Image: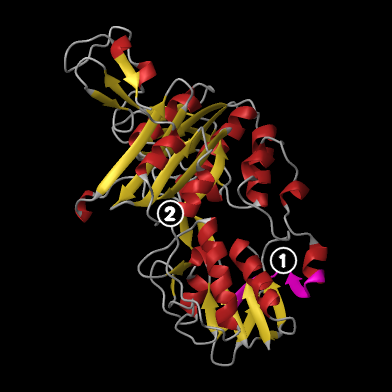
Amino acid sequence: MKVVIIGNNVSGTFTAQNIRLLNEEVEIEIYTQEKYPYYTRVNLPELISEKVKVDDLIVFKQDWYENKQIKLNLNSRIKKINPKNKTLELDGKDHLISYDKLVLALGSTPNIPPIKNAVKLKDEKKGVFTLRSIDDALEVKNFIHNKNIKKAIVIGGGLLGLELANQIKNSGLDTTVVEFFPRLLPRQLDLECGEMLKEEIESKGIEVVLDAATEEIIGNGSVKSIILKGGKELFADVVLIQAGIRPTIKIAHDANLRTNRGILVNEYLQTSEKDIFAVGDCIEYNNQIWGIIPACMEQSKIAAASVLGLQNVEYQGTTPKNTLKIVGLELTSVGIIDTPKEQGGGWQILKKADKKDCCYQKLVLKDGKLKGAILFGDTDAVSFVYNKLDKNVDKDELRELLRLYIYICKNCGKRYDEAVMTTLFRDLPENFKCPGCNAPKEDFKKKE
């Protein structure tokens, strides 16, 4: 049996690896328009600041593919899928590529919001860029150096946008982040932790503008500025747009596979054609797209089994899990990070906010089960959170985990519970008085 995979990103590469783990005989070929073997996109911003070189980003060298008997075809763009005769048309080549099973790991492209002049200035290479590939990063780096750029704006305060801003700042540029939502990392952080991160980023000399919709990029021969909704103008020599992704679906749509926002798949990651499967950023399942590495990894295992006819595991969706460094600070964001009011009662939050040490820990519970967490600046509880997600947890154990304490007034018995208060007891002002009997702060004792 011959399996062809279109795409050498994380989902495509690990689907190939998982197929090989399950079957040593099947023929596996990967086609990618990239000129490099599989590399990590997470560290692309560091290529701009020259903190890393291209070779440092490549995860699997050529010999990895050879050892696993996976044929990798670089610089090879598939232009058409012919499901009826199970062939593929390769751009610039006359011969057809045959397959028995096909896996679409088409990935995604950077989303460009409806900003006037954005696409035009990007296509004309006049100072507007997106960052998705090694070549994109090299193009940005060369533009900054060759044009003697002094001031940059990054549109998008997500994970890649913030790390990009950090590396642009490290390249010696005056840097501003413009975010549409009222907080940074809107998918990973709540409002309070987002504000803490904002202060930390600003302390590095990066300006942050929140709740700001960019309406127009001004520039003719080169970028001059951006105009925000409301008329405010921010000046810059280069604009980098990191505003999410769009699933790549055109080649699937042209082959009459069912598509919506993404390529529609069933619980086995099978498309509307029985011998074609799809995985990663390009798919849509149960009206949802993911665009996160944990989803790609999880889906690659299911797709591999399904391709080989071992359809014994169904895809249930992926709980968002992120553990990473953002501007040098450890961050873990897992599952539900805000209590959904529309889902009724039973929700509880345990939270520790230590602004002095830039540490924020929040656990979200539903009916005694751990449903999500934010761990920022202190990730000692990461393994516990990952192991206990969607399981029953003991609240006293959680208090101990986060080092949250109850202080009791020895005069009237009034309790100060750090788990539900916005300020740690130690950070209360010295003139704090007991709300029950007006006793001084020193009359409170920690509950053992």
The structure residue drawn at horizontal position 55% and vertical position 81%, both measured from the top left corner, is: 306
Q: Quadrant of residue 266?
A: bottom left
Q: Between residues 47 and 368, which one lies in front from this camera angle?
A: 368
Residue 234 spot, x, y in % from top left:
43, 28
Q: Tell me the kind of residue under disc 1.
A: Asn
Is residue 132 among what the camera can see? yes
Q: Quadrant of residue 258?
A: bottom left
Q: Is residue 69 above or below residue 431?
A: below
Q: Residues within 10 Å of mark 1 (few under 14, many from 20)?
A: few
Residue 340 spot, x, y in % from top left:
26, 50
Q: Image quadrant for the N terminus?
A: bottom right
Give the CA distance from mark 2 to mark 1.
42 Å
Q: Tell me the kind of residue under disc 2.
A: Leu
Residue 99 spot, x, y in % from top left:
65, 86
Mark 2 element type: loop
Single out the mark in the foreground, 2 or 1: 2
The structure residue drawn at horizontal position 66% and vertical position 65%, both measured from the top left corner, is: 33
Q: What residue did someone put label 1 on?
A: 75
Mark 1 element type: loop
Is residue 75 covered in magenta?
yes
Q: Is residue 358 above or below residue 188?
A: above
State the extent of the magenta-drawn residues as a range: 67-79
Is residue 333 covered in magenta?
no
Residue with the most extreme bottom position: 85
Q: Between residues 225 and 328, which one lies in front from this camera angle?
A: 328
Q: Quadrant of residue 115?
A: top left
Q: What residue did someone put label 2 on?
A: 389
Earlier residue among tags 2 and 1: 1
